[in-house]
Amino acid sequence: MKFKWWIAGYLVAMALVLIAPLASPDPDGLERVAEDKGFIEEGNDAPYSIIADYVFPGIENETVATILAGWIGVTVMMVVVAGSAYLIHRRNAGKAATGQASG
């Protein structure tokens, strides 16, 4: 079987999600500057939230909820990217078969 780099990348990303709960609880750089300069209150909340605060709802154990949210996020993004790549490849293969220039 031919080695698929995207499968290895997916598995590495899924493994990295396991250590996500070990990330620093301190705010990131942009949030820290907003706090230090006193304009953090002026920020708006996101207009929607699929998995708020990177914690899957309904699970009491925050570590497990964070890991599950990460796995879902990685999987959704993998499906979107792989699906887009497949559609682009299929479109370009169709153009090549009919003799149209790609662009």
Image (tube, rainbow, N blue to C red):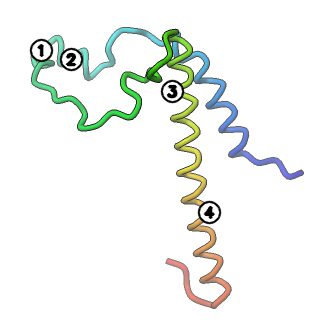
| Crowd rating for badge 3 (residues with CA inside 10 Å; few <14, some 14–19, many 20+) | many
Q: Position of residue 55 (x, y in %)?
A: 44, 20
Sequence order check, earlier mark of 4 and 3: 3
Amino acid type of the residue that numbered disc 4 sits on in the rendered structure = Tyr
Distance from label 1 to label 3 (Cα)? Answer: 32 Å
Instruction: Identify the disc placed on residue 37.
Output: 1
| Crowd rating for badge 1 (residues with CA inside 10 Å; few <14, some 14–19, many 20+) | few
Sequence order check, earlier mark of 2 and 4: 2
Disc 1 + disc 2, Cβ < 8 Å: yes
- Mark 4, residue position: 86
The relative height of residue 24 versus residue 3 in the rendered view (above or below) is above
Residue depicted at 66% across the width and 25% down the height: 15
Sequence order check, earlier mark of 1 and 4: 1
Residue depicted at 39% across the width and 9% down the height: 25
Please indicate whether residue 7 sits to the left or right of residue 20 in the image.
Answer: right
Quarter residue 42 falls in = top left
Distance from label 4 to label 3 (Cα)? Answer: 26 Å
- Mark 2, residue position: 33
- Mark 3, residue position: 69
